[in-house]
Amino acid sequence: MKLKIKTISEALQSGVSMYQRGLLLTIMAVKEIDPKMTLAKFKAVTNMREANLALILLHKKGLIEWSGCDNAVKNIKKKTASKEVVEIIDFMNNLYGRKFDPNSKHNISILTARLKNYSINDIKSVVSNRYLRWKDDKVMHTNLNPGTIFRTKNFEKYFEDAKSTRVGESIMSAEKMSLEHGQVLVLSDVLDFSPSSIYNVRTYKVTAEGLRIGAGVNSKLRGNAIKSLLIKEDLKLRRGDSVEYEYLYQKQ
């Protein structure tokens, strides 16, 4: 590792981020103490996992010369989650209200293995299925995490449960249509609802002017029942009449 600048003033005027500048100054200080400082020795005084990206940028800006830069770039790319892994973890985080890291080594490894035999939708169906099975269970809800759900010995039985019982299909169909909590449902929103799956809906009676009456009522309705209700309201609109009820999608 070779420094290509000689003074602190050059480091301060280098146009890099605060973290990169701090790392650069650290390299300068260490080099002053030991001019023959190698990268291997530098690792002993620096957290290289955090420093690698900054070192790559310093090398690209011509502030240091680092022979290992190309290999570091390759290693970072290997540790970055694929778009499929990111999509699944994002889906899980949104549903579970968690902040699992898609770029963690464990999550990349375990999901990459599952993606060899299952599609993204297959995996999402298991994520949804386990959520509805465990979210209200004081013991099992702690297992709503990638390590438990995607573990090899568990995943196949969870997938079979999702496929045979269809528990979780309501979440999948709502996700497919990008429905948001509190969104007013119209007929076109529910055409892909699973007929037998249960959805949470808040129903309001409305005035002829479209104003809601009261606080509304929460209900658990099957997809085919929701379609029937919205078909009736849609027919009223087609006749030029006012709708009587408004239905809002509720996240499960």
Image (spheres, helix red, strand yellow):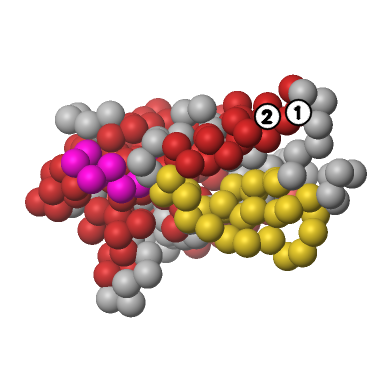
11 and 78: which one is in front? 78
Q: Are there few (<14), some (14-19), or many (20+) residues within 10 Å of tag 2?
A: some
Residue 167 painted magenta: yes
Give the residue drawn at x 34%, y 32%: 121
Residue 121 painted magenta: no
In the image, 144: left or right of 54? left
Q: Percent x, y for residue 102?
A: 41, 46
Q: State whether residue 155 appears in this view.
A: no
In the picture of the structure, the residue carrying the numbered disc 2 is 234
Residue type marked 1: Leu
In the image, 85: left or right of 10? left
Say which element carries label 2: helix
In the picture of the structure, the residue carrying the numbered disc 1 is 237
Q: Quadrant of residue 58?
A: top right
Q: Which region is colored magenta? A: 162-169
Q: Quadrant of the N terminus?
A: top left
Q: State whether residue 212 appears in this view.
A: yes
**Farthest residue in the bottom direction?**
138
Q: Percent x, y for residue 171?
A: 43, 44
94 and 86: which one is in front? 94
Q: Are marks 2 and 1 in contact (CB under 8 Å)?
A: yes
Q: Main secondary structure of the magenta part?
A: helix
Q: Percent x, y for residue 77?
A: 39, 33
136 and 201: which one is in front? 201
Q: Are there few (<14), some (14-19), or many (20+) residues within 10 Å of tag 1?
A: few
Residue type marked 2: Asp
144 and 245: which one is in front? 245
Answer above or below: position of 84 versus 125: above
